[in-house]
């Protein structure tokens, strides 16, 4: 694998996450799940549970689309074998990629919060 392939895959994942984020309220669903367990917002346990749904949603779309693009447009894979290869690949890779994306989500939130705070300053405290 060379840097061109890695960059194309990164750009594809970025685009998938961006488009899905426009239309799917997965953060709200994650908040709902954490509140379902009566976890206090801002705690580590809340964040751990809240991140499950966004990671699952984004991971599912990324696995299905990236694997499909890599398999269905690959002339080295016989056309008759592509569908089964794609299904097997998705089933095999989903859990692995979910774990990676779940932990990467915490790094992304930390980095995004840090950049936003540097640019916009600290947010106003919530009034009760």
Image (cartoon, rainbow, N blue to C red):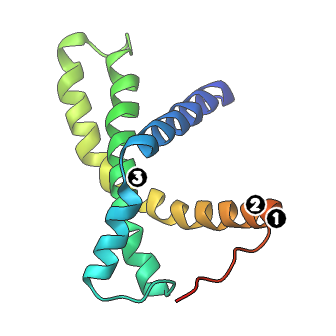
Q: Which residue is mark 3?
A: 97
Quarter location, residue 38 = bottom left
Q: Which residue is mark 2?
A: 115
Measure the C-alpha gap from mark 1 to mark 3: 31 Å
Q: Residue at x 52, y 31 (%)?
A: 12
Residue 118 badge: 1
Q: Residue at x 45, y 45 (%)?
A: 21
Q: Position of residue 121 (x, y in %)?
A: 80, 69
Rendered view: 24 above or below 39: above
| Residue closest to the eye, 92 or 64 | 64
115 left or right of 59? right
Residue 19 badge: none
Q: Residues within 10 Å of mark 2 (few under 14, many from 20)?
A: few
Q: Most extreme residue toward the front, as rendered? A: 127
Rendered view: 17 above or below 28: above
Q: Position of residue 13 (x, y in %)?
A: 50, 38
Q: Residues within 10 Å of mark 1 (few under 14, many from 20)?
A: few
Q: Residue at x 31, y 36 (%)?
A: 64
At mark 2, the secondary structure is: helix
């Amino acid at each position: 694998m060379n840097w061109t392939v890695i960059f194309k895959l990164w750009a594809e994942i970025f685009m998938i996450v961006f488009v899905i984020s426009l239309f799917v309220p997965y953060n709200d669903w994650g908040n709902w799940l954490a509140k379902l367990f009566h976890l206090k917002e801002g705690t580590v346990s809340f964040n751990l549970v809240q991140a499950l749904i966004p990671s699952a949603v984004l991971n599912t779309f990324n696995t299905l689309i990236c694997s499909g693009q890599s398999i269905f447009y690959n002339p080295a894979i016989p056309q008759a074998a592509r569908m089964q290869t794609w299904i097997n690949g998705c089933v095999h890779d989903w859990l692995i990629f979910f774990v990676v994306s779940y932990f990467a989500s915490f790094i992304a939130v930390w980095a995004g919060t840090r950049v936003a705070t540097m640019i916009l300053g600290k947010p106003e405290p919530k009034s009760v």
